[in-house]
Image (cartoon, rainbow, N blue to C red):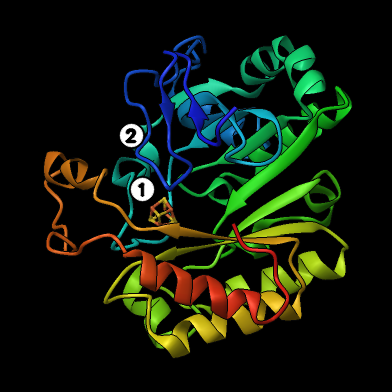
């Protein structure tokens, strides 16, 4: 099968950062009926989470066919975000962890046959550490491969127990220079770097992801800094993800100002140059 996202509507989308399929949403997951006061306690206990959507994907968010669960809420505000509707937790649907785990269980044979598993993504899954921990633990109890797709900014919220339940981390490093990172995300770079080192020390498999945006993240020095960091961990592979404009309309729909209106995707020469910067350090690049 060619690399791409196999959605449940049968469409194969390219393996690049992609807008969430709003049509799927949380279909198949029963929203929680807990009232407001019950919800607060359940969220604290990790029994309840705010879920944006989920989908079945192949060869994108980790190996094999995976159920990727996108949680709502993110502390970053990436200028190139393809899913700005995942930035706020209140836009998600309250769903109980047991409900998600029951759905995961249904796909056990698919995961086994394809070498796939569960990926918890967002938004930022570590905005809801208790809920994320419940999903990871539940999947491990079923013998299912687990992955976490995170910016690492909230890595301090990831407990050692959660790390033990992870087989793979997709670490999204938005930039290598602190000032560029702040321009891109509005936040500090250091927590991401710290979290990556902690994962490496724990012996976790890391795939580093870097979104290449002309005029924003493509400076030679910025890529060199990401590549140096990737080589220092080290990481199992690097995904250089070309910026695209597929999420543009969502910004307008949400009434948010989109600053990359005139930015074009990177051309082949730029992609080759940037991939070469990683390859020069002996890293495997996709
Ligand atoms: S970390 Fe991801 S979800 Fe959060 S703002 Fe950045 S691109 Fe969007």
Q: Report whether the residue tagged 2 is closer than 8 Å to ligand 1.
A: no
Residue, x 62% and y 15% (percent of image)? 99
In the displayed structure image, the side of residue 119 where residue 253 appears, left or right: left
Placement of 234 over or under 99, stated as above or below? below
Residue 11 screen position, x and y as percent: 41, 20
Q: Which mark is residue 87?
A: 1
Q: Nearer the viewer, residue 15 or 132?
A: 15
Classify residue 97 by image quadrant: top right
Q: Quadrant of residue 167?
A: top right
Q: Quadrant of the N terminus?
A: top right
Image quadrant of ligand 1 equals bottom left
Place of residue 248 in the rendered image (x, y in percent of width and height, measured from the top left)? 20, 47
Give the side of residue 67 with respect to residue 219, left or right.
right
Residue linked to disc 2? 91
Q: Label 1: how many residues lie within 10 Å, few (<14), some (14-19) or many (20+)?
A: many
Q: Which mark is residue 183?
A: none
């Amino acid at each position: 099968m060619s690399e791409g996202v196999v959605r449940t509507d049968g469409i194969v989308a390219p393996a690049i950062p992609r807008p969430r399929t709003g049509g799927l949403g949380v279909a198949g997951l029963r929203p929680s009926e807990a009232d407001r006061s019950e919800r607060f306690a359940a969220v604290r206990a990790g029994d309840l989470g705010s879920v944006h959507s989920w989908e079945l994907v192949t060869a994108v968010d980790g190996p094999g066919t995976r159920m990727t669960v996108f949680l709502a809420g993110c502390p970053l505000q990436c200028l190139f975000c393809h899913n700005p509707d995942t930035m706020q937790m209140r836009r998600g649907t309250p769903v109980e962890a047991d409900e998600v785990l029951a759905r995961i269980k249904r796909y056990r044979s698919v995961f086994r046959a394809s070498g796939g598993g569960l990926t918890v993504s967002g938004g930022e899954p570590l905005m809801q550490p208790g809920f994320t921990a419940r999903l990871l633990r539940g999947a491990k109890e079923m013998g299912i491969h687990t992955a976490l797709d995170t910016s690492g900014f909230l890595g301090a919220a990831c407990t050692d127990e959660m790390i033990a339940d992870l087989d793979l981390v997709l670490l999204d490093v938005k930039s290598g220079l602190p000032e560029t990172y702040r321009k891109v995300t509005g936040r500090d770079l250091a927590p991401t770097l710290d979290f990556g080192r902690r994962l490496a020390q724990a012996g976790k498999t890391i795939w580093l992801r870097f979104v290449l945006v002309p005029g924003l993240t493509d400076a030679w020095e910025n890529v060199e800094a990401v590549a140096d960091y990737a080589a220092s961990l080290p990481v199992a592979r690097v995904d250089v993800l070309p910026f695209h404009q597929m999420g543009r309309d969502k910004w307008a729909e949400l009434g948010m100002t989109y600053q990359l209106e005139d930015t074009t995707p990177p051309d082949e020469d730029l992609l080759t140059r940037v991939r070469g910067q990683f390859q020069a350090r002996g890293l495997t690049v996709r």
